Amino acid sequence: MEGDAVLIIGNLMNIEKEIGLYPQAIQQGLGFLTKQNLTNLTVGEYKIKADLIFAKIASYDTQPVEQRRPERHDKYIDIQCIVEGEERIDSAPLKAAGEIDENKMEERDVLYYKDMQVEDSLVLKKGMFAIYFPWDLHRPNCNAGKQSVHVKKAVVKIAMSEL
């Protein structure tokens, strides 16, 4: 139901057992994550199905949660998968969104918020993934502990029109 979080969490080590449960487009995105040697992929964008399904490989240091803004997307689902390191991602249903901080929907399909009223925290480690839908707010790239950690992450973007 729109407005309630439908966050899906998993681990690539178990994907063979559950991949058939997902819609075809999500299967394609997860297939990319399992068939590629993610450790060897360089930072950049990788097309899976033109602009409808693609992956972005990023490398960065996590930051304190106070320095990260909640965000959401309209056009794409995110499959966020940790390749190296670990990070905390906070999430909440869209109805918990605070005041809009920055609107980048036209350029980058992202709307940033100043805060969210209710947050659940999740620590993703190597091989773990989380799937965020347009009605899921998420605050990625946060420190899982007290210290910053270097992370390599794959984010597969799936157009909602593919579902």
Image: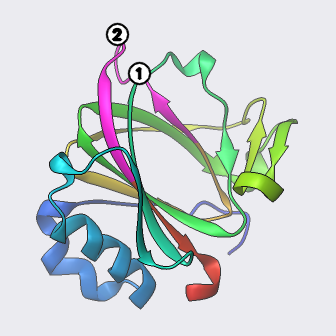
Answer with the quarter of the image where residue 103 lies: top right
Identify which residue, 127 or 38, lies in the foreground: 38
In the rendered image, is residue 163 in sight? no
Farthest residue to the top: give it.
146
In the rendered image, is residue 88 in sight? yes
Q: CA distance from mark 2 to mark 1?
A: 6 Å
Image location of residue 42, percent across then percent down: 29, 46
- Local SS, label 2: loop
Residue type for callout 1: Asn
Q: Which residues are magenta?
A: 139-154
Q: Which residue is mark 1?
A: 143
Residue drawn where x is 75% and y is 40% of the image: 112
Residue drawn where x is 69% and y is 69% of the image: 75
Image location of residue 5, percent across then percent down: 60, 60
Identify which residue, 129 or 43, lies in the foreground: 43
Residue 72 lies within the magenta run: no
Side of 86 relative to 44 (left or right)? left
The quadrant of the picture occupied by the N terminus is: bottom right
Indicate which disc residue 88 carries. Answer: none
The quadrant of the picture occupied by the C terminus is: bottom right
Residue type for callout 2: Gln
Position above or below: 134 against 95: below
Residue 147 lies within the magenta run: yes
Indicate which disc residue 147 carries. Answer: 2
Position above or below: 112 against 20: above
Image location of residue 16, percent across then percent down: 14, 78
Label 2: how many Cα within 10 Å (few below 14, some 14–19, many 20+): few
Residues at marks 2 and 1 touching, judged by CB atoms closer than 8 Å: yes
- Local SS, label 1: loop
Side of 100 relative to 91 (left or right)? right
Residue drawn where x is 31% and y is 20% of the image: 149
Residue drawn where x is 51% and y is 79% of the image: 50
